[in-house]
Image (cartoon, coloured by chain):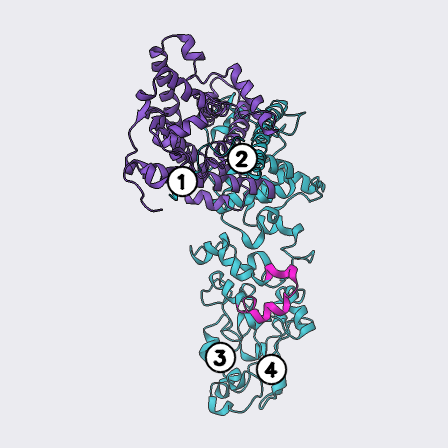
Chain colours: A purple, B cyan
Amino acid sequence: MKESAPGSPYQRHRLSVSERGEGPLLWRFSRVDRVLHALMVISFLGLVVTEIPLHFSYAPWARRAVRVFGGFEAAGLIHRMCAIITFGYFFGHIITLIVRYRRAPSAKQFFLGPNSMVPQKKDLLDVIQQFKWYFGRGPKPQFDRFSYMEKFDYWAVFWGVAIIGGSGMMLWFPEFFSGFMPGWMFNIATIIHGDEALLALGFIFTIHFFNVHLRPEKFPIDLVIFTGRATAEYMREEHPLEYQRLQAEGKLEERMAPPVDRTYYVWSIAMGFAALAMGVTTVALVIWTVLLH
Amino acid sequence: MIRTGSGPLGGGFAVLAMVSAGFVLCAPSSGAQEPPVEPDYDCTRCHSDPLFLEGKTETPEGDAALLVPPDLVLGSRHAELACTACHLEQGETGYPHSASVVAVQCGSCHEAEGQDWLASIHARNLADEGDGATCVDCHRAHDVYAADDRRSLTYPLNVAELCGSCHADPDIVGTYFALPEKADAREAVATYYETVHGVALTRAGLTVSAACNDCHEGHRVLSSDSPDASTHREQLTETCGACHQGVRDSWEQSAHGVAYREGTTAPNGRPAPSCADCHSSHAVVRAVTEEWFVGVVDECGDCHEHLYDTYFETYHGKVTRLGYGMTAKCSDCHTPHEMYPADDERSSVHPNNLVATCARCHPTANDNFAQYYPHGDPTDRENYPDLYWTWRFMSTLLAGVFLFFGIHTVLWIIRLMINRARGLGHDGGPRSGPPSPASEGAE
């Protein structure tokens, strides 16, 4: 691609869907959200790749895979370190929620406003509208700041970290937990930990990847979560209600973002594609293993 | 010079030495032989003279077969014997003697060994195929030494090499162990060196470790198919137990030993195990290695199929299957040989002993801890309802989420394909929307 105009890397590369169209860049994700998401990507991938050899220990690749990490004890160590990162971003996020709650004009605004992740009636209507659109019975639903898919992703992680993290702690410190719970709880924790992890990796690496990165209007990657900013064009198409709201309130100006620093942009692409590739490879391996063994 | 032997062989039965030239008959003759009379001539005058012996024999070994330097015999276990003690007819026919009179019958003195050898597969092969190890192949002809003499081929440290001179010869094993089920026998010597017995003997130099003849016997060597063989399944506990007495005692008391004597079989029809069912003979690995501990689980699983499967559902099992000996394996909880039914108070998995058993790896284990199901089966609703319902709940959750979002995604893709076919934008509106990044990028 030839360099057509100097300025933001967006105009020069146009790799990502977040670079579609002309117009100003708008902030979509704050720095703390981006950092927490990056920690989530790194730790989740670390957890998954060190988990699946154990989960699918019967698979022909399992022994080799676990040796890549330096044996099962090293893999377990990496897994637990990633678990600590997970608890870190989880509680980091709780803190940001508390901060945002304090800054919010009202509790109602915080819990039920457009920036809230709390599912609302409109989300249910959006799901129905989405299916109507599938069958040609109406237009595509118009989303505000978060679509119902993003809210589901969010709560899936919230629930997942709590459930997988909780059961994981039990399995990490069985001697401690057996002080007050019967041993068969560890059997239950094993089932929940493994199946919930399978749900998480299956969901993230297929549904989440498709919804966010791989569907044609976004293919091959949506960098907004990494760069934090999206074009107005992107916002008008993906989050029209939020765009219109900002426009009506005259707040578009204050959401304007400067172009992405080139180094930061390259890192975003590298990290985004590496994570996509690892995820797709992993889920392909898991599906192949489940189907064939 | 060779002195005349008079009187019976002193301590000769440990020697098992027999002499022959060319061919051998180990059959004991009827009745004990009288000590030979002292010959009035000196055998060594001719038999230590290569020039004289030249062209005197047409045997494959050539003249060298006839060359018997006096030192050879004088240094041996048979130093006290006259030549004619073995070469009987020689003493009677006098000089010059014919080639046909050199037949030697070792069994005439070594009666028990001769009988054992006659019963062996070596003797049968000699009769049937004209080929089989005889006395001199293992004990040599003239330089015969006691088995505890380091110069002897039958000294413990030398046995594997001695047996291997035939049993590691590709031509020989290829001929006699050609059948597929004899594959192990073709590799017997090579694998022996890898076993705990072979390592102890050859690398640790431990002469009490089992050499070939300790399990297969020295003379009555038989195929393990033969009921009389020391290596036959029915004889193994005696054979192995000769050295491993403590283990044999434990095994006899154990559930396996009881079931073995009673002839009880596993649900899949396999008989109760004796030694080699778990410690496969020529892959006897030292039972302290990771390799052994990881591998022995499969041996237990041959009979305990369900326990085997459910074990691999646990963290213990999964780590083991990845090839690491770190986590609990069958014998860590059930002991290697002292296993009893769980309702037997001696059992390591009896409720009274469970905490102590867990505590061997988990030092702080308590009553709660010991309520873990080491063989929990989530598909077993009757015995593990808690696991069953957890598993059902999780399966339903997974199926529900993937079903809903699978449909959600597939329908989305179909919609996009329809829109594209109709020349519409991604959202179904006119294509006035955002130009695709690709086309934009080509500007």
Q: Earlier in the sequence, mark 3 or mark 2?
A: 3
Q: Is residue B86 left or right of residue B193?
A: right
For the residues beneath circles 3 and 2, the answer to whether they share a chain is yes
Please state the horizontal and vertical placement of residue B182, each as a whole percent of the image.
63, 61
- Determine which of the numbered discs, if any, sits on residue B424 in the image: 2
Q: Which residue is mark 3?
A: B2
**Could you tell me if the residues under marks 1 and 4 are in contact, i.e. CB atoms within 8 Å?**
no
Q: Is residue B252 left or right of residue A198?
A: right
Q: How far, Cα to Cα, is label 1 from label 4?
A: 105 Å
Q: Secondary structure at mark 4?
A: helix
Amino acid marked by disc 1? Glu
Q: Which residue is mark 4?
A: B102
Q: How far, Cα to Cα, is label 2 from label 1?
A: 18 Å
For the residues beneath circles 2 and 1, the answer to whether they share a chain is yes
For the residues beneath circles 1 and 3, the answer to whether they share a chain is yes
Q: Which residue is mark 1?
A: B440
Q: How far, Cα to Cα, is label 2 from label 4?
A: 108 Å
The mark closer to the camera, 4 or 3, is 4
Q: Chain of mark 2?
A: B
Q: How far, Cα to Cα, is label 4 from label 3?
A: 17 Å
Q: Is residue B286 above or below residue B330?
A: below
Amino acid marked by disc 2? Leu
- Residue A74 visible: no
Q: Is residue B168 magenta?
A: yes
Q: Secondary structure at mark 3?
A: loop
Q: Chain of mark 4?
A: B
The image quarter containing residue A49 is top left
Amino acid marked by disc 3? Ile
Provide the major secondary structure of the magenta segment.
Answer: helix
Q: What range is drawn magenta here?
A: B165-185
Q: Is residue B213 magenta?
A: no
